[in-house]
Image (cartoon, rainbow, N blue to C red):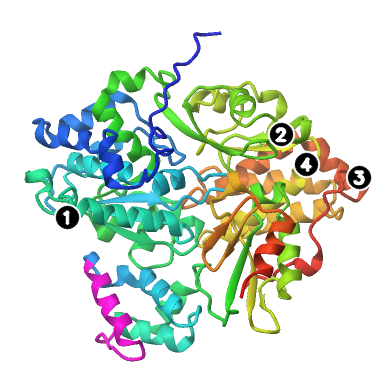
Amino acid sequence: MSAPLKREVYLLSRVGLVDSHTLPVYRANGGYQALEKVLTGGYTPAQVIQIVKDSGLRGRGGAGFSAGLKWSFMPDPAKDPRPRYLAVNADESEPGTCKDRVLMERDPHGLIEGILIACFAMRVKTAYVYVRGEYRLSHDRVRDAIAEARQAGLVGQKILGTDFCCDIWMHKGAGAYICGEETGLMESLEGKRGHPRPKPPFPAGFGLWGQPTTVNNVETLANVPFVIARGADWFKSLGTPKSPGNVLIGISGHVERPGVYELPLGISARTVLEECAGGVWKGRQLKAWIPGGSSTGLLPASKIDVALDHDSIREAGSMLGTVAMIMLDETACTVRAMQVIARFYDHESCGQCSQCREGTEWLHQIFARIERGLGRMQDIELLSALAGGMAPAKTICALADAAAIPTHAIVRHFRAELEEHVRLGRCPLGASSHAPELEEAHA
Amino acid sequence: MSDSKREGLPAELLRELDELVTHYPEKRAALIPALHRCQEELGGWLSPDVLEAVAAYFALEPVEVFGVASFYPMFHLRPVGKHVVGVCHNIACELRGAEEILATACRVTGAKPGRVSADGRFTVTRVECQGACTAAPMLVLDGAFHENLTPDSAAKLLGGVR
């Protein structure tokens, strides 16, 4: 084993303070010093991008792409003077994921400072925070914090007395998961159905209203003031060489203490389960777990010692995603869990691509009939064949992949449980589907 | 496409929309926030008349506005009860008893999933993940999250709604 990872809390360092969401508390605890450093310390936008690149900060919205590199894709304004935008992805909707909400509700100024530094670096004058409509408190807290910051000369014209101008607007979504996909988000922000766009063109060249646009996740931006204030080397001292920094890890499902915890990337899943979440609930054993939100494949309990970084999780056969761990105890039925997950992607498919529109519905129906004891042995091969026809990279966006990946995972790791449902003609764990009178027809 | 018309919506709401559209380089971008405000102010749902008035304000064809409104689950296109209860049935809530919470909500309110109760007081719906997974199971009552529920606490909460 390598040396233990350094533990240091920064992202959640303020959230326990009384009135942590207000400007005076934020400022009294180091807030807006990174912005001041950038604006009055003689930094050029290119230098800020270089620091973020050097830090190795990877996006926290699921894909794990280098944040600094993404920023560098924005065209040089000397050659491309079109208006440009930052869209903040606060449409946190991947089942299991509820970490951006903690930042927005309890440390909204941290997000705003990150937005302002990002806008300086990319020479953006207008940012939109696309927050999912259900997050009422998040919306109101960030909106009020923007108003406070505007009053204090931190948002709007001539920020901190410099030539830097930047406006930030809140924009409320209305409950569609697909709007967390960056091009679906942009369509939605333009007042349309959230239909993802084919890529290319990429947002940096053709984004909101056809103009250069970058889309960043809330937690990614919340890291930025710390990277600037403390430097790339400090950031790299946390986590692993390829996945540096801390990450907000959600752990939910069958554990004693579900919650959102801040830990260095590369921490073992077992540490999160046992040390933070108090272990599997009711003294039971772990059966299966999902490492990064419901689109990342289910893993068996035997993989619980894997390190939570991008490469290690991939080697273990899943993905880091949003590091939203969902734990299933020994009494849980993995087929029922997959039925629920497939139902979700069926509900959320935007319908543009036939593989996704038809495929998610089929997956849902097949998992439902196996769980009800009405499945056939050949359904298991059908699941694999369907998932293989939906992904990888066969559709405009990755929603089809999000349904296909966990389907492949359950067939690979829990095939015996699928077969037992078929053989017995019922759920062997008694986790039969909910009562028919509580079914809801599609609206 | 036609010119913007200011009919069929209260004057105060129109003034609010006039401010909202200034946030964007193109007016249409304010459509979804505008639909939210209309739903909040005009009875909790978006009637065909309201959708047509919104279309007129944005100088859009009504069919375009219907197409957007019907895409987003938070918009109700049929009348709802005085109170709207959404019970999350996604994976984290499912693992901690969401179906029992839903059964409790239906029993206490007298509403069936997706329907308005006979007395008109409640709509109960199944909703997808609300982002409260670490506080499951949960329900949303008139937009407010209620977390870490048990069937008893859910019954007490809904039984106390006036």
Of callouts 3 and 1, which one flags the residue occurring earlier in the amino acid sequence? 1
How far across and down, in percent of the image, does residue A240 sit?
44, 19
**Residue most toward the right?**
A424
User: Disc 4 sits on a residue from what chain?
Assistant: A
How far across and down, in percent of the image, does residue A66 sit?
35, 32
Relative horizontal placement of residue A430, taking residue A434 as reference (left or right):
right
Relative horizontal placement of residue B18, taking residue A1 as reference (left or right):
left
Q: Which mark is residue B158?
A: none
User: Which residue is found at the position 86% from the left and 46% from the top?
Assistant: A421
Contact, mark 1 vs mark 4 (Cβ under 8 Å): no
Of callouts 3 and 2, which one flags the residue occurring earlier in the amino acid sequence? 2
Q: Which mark is residue A423?
A: 3
Contact, mark 2 vs mark 4 (Cβ under 8 Å): yes
| Residue at image mark 4 | A332
User: Which residue is found at the position 17% from the left and 55% from the top?
Assistant: A83
Q: Which mark is residue A83?
A: 1
Magenta segment, which residues? B1-22
Of callouts 1 and 4, which one flags the residue occurring earlier in the amino acid sequence? 1
Secondary structure under the numbered disc 2 in the rendered image? strand
Contact, mark 1 vs mark 2 (Cβ under 8 Å): no
Which of discs 1 and 4 lies nearer the camera? The answer is 4
Dot 2 amino acid type: Ala
Separation of residues labelled 4 and 3 (CA atoms): 19 Å
**Residue most toward the bottom?**
B7
**In this orientation, which residue lies closer to the viewer: A115 or B109?**
B109
